[in-house]
Amino acid sequence: MLKRISILFLSVSVGTISYLEASTARLKDITNLQGVRDNQLIGYGLVVGLDGTGDGGSNQMTIQSMATMLNNLGVGVDASQVNSRNVASVIVTAYLPPFARQGSKMDVLVSSMGDAQSLQGGTLLLTPLKGADGEVYAVAQGPITLGGFQAAAGGARESRNHSTVGKVPSGAVIETELPFDFTRLTNLTYSLKNPDFTTANRIAAVINRQLNGSYAAANDSGTVRVRVPDQFKGRVVELVSSIENLAVRPDTVARVVVNERTGTVVVGEDVRISTVAVAHGNLTISIQPQTVVSQPEAFSDGQTVVVDEPFIEVQEGDDNFALLPGGVSIGDLVRALNALGISPRDLISVFQAIQASGALQAELEII
């Protein structure tokens, strides 16, 4: 039986069309304030204390790192004498939050980069974390927590989730602060997450109403610049707090998004079609193998022959024909397509055909 098309509010599910009702959104949810963002950090380190699940003895990278670390700690050792499966080479990554102060802590992600089987029970050794400029901004160290495990005994092995990636909660201490004096700003720049000229203009209008003056202006479809009023000089945080919760109704381009791999179809609110007639019939071809045995007569010189003769059956669904009037809303469109008995996966082909005819007044995006 064909699955009917249903409308779900504020949700997207496989095999359904989701209709997101247009509504207002907070300014903080649809924009980013320039200068207020995370910064990526990365470092190379060693994890010790593994129960024989670390890198193999032939991993020269881990062996050399262990020898170098021991030499730096005053233990003279030759790399050829190092051989342990209780150590693993890892890449440590983290996001330095905005306005992070020296001594603050943050989580780090630890990922194996060798042939270690598991990082379970390991401890990350002191690892400097550098930014894109090569400067050290934090150092990480501590026990690793995993979301999975791996166990082996007597040739049997059991694993759950991923055991070569883990976290060190609050494992990094910030050593260097990013120089940024937020209170001295004279202008604020908001970047739209989904650039749109109408949305940018609405944001500027809402901010000007809130500040009771002409302080905000849209530079383009992606940025809105706000001049800090004199009464908020030195109190920029208060200004940002007063405008970031303002309600704005974002505008978007009419778009139909389809995913052929999962059968997901998402239709935007502003999608319209011109007058068009749609017919859709389902063709089902079923091939079933059948074995036919040919038995020779008694006392003959013939041989028994086995032949595979597939049985082919073709069924075509009832053709339905529907007229979709021009300018219909998304609700009318869904009801009309429901009348055709079209499944969500077949709907992808229907939208492609409507676009090819020039009747779809929207963008068709296939992901």
Image (tube, grey):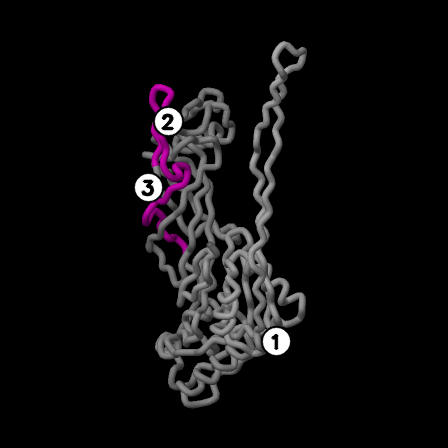
Asked whether, in this view, residue 153 is left or right of residue 65, the answer is left
Task: Give x and y (percent) for residue 215.
Answer: 47, 85
Q: Earlier in the sequence, mark 2 or mark 1?
A: 2
Q: For marks 2 and 3, give the CA distance.
A: 21 Å
Task: Give x and y (percent) for residue 245.
Answer: 37, 76
**Identity of the residue drawn at 42% across and 36% down:** 46
Residue under pointer 1: 274
Q: Is residue 325 magenta?
A: no
Q: Say what secondary structure mark 3 lies in.
A: loop
Q: For marks 1 and 3, give the CA distance.
A: 57 Å
Q: For marks 2 and 1, give the CA distance.
A: 61 Å
Figure quadrant of residue 73:
top left
Name of the residue lying farthest toward the front: 298
Asked whether, in this view, residue 257 is left or right of residue 18, the answer is right
Q: Nearer the viewer, mark 2 or mark 1?
A: 1
Which residue type does callout 2 highlight?
A: Arg
> On screen, 212 above or below 70?
below
Main SS of the magenta segment? strand
311 and 240: which is toward the camera = 311
Q: Say what secondary structure mark 2 lies in.
A: strand
Residue under pointer 2: 157
Highlighted range, magenta: 149-176
Figure quadrant of residue 8:
bottom left
Q: Say what secondary structure mark 1 lies in.
A: loop
**Identity of the residue drawn at 42% across and 32% down:** 88
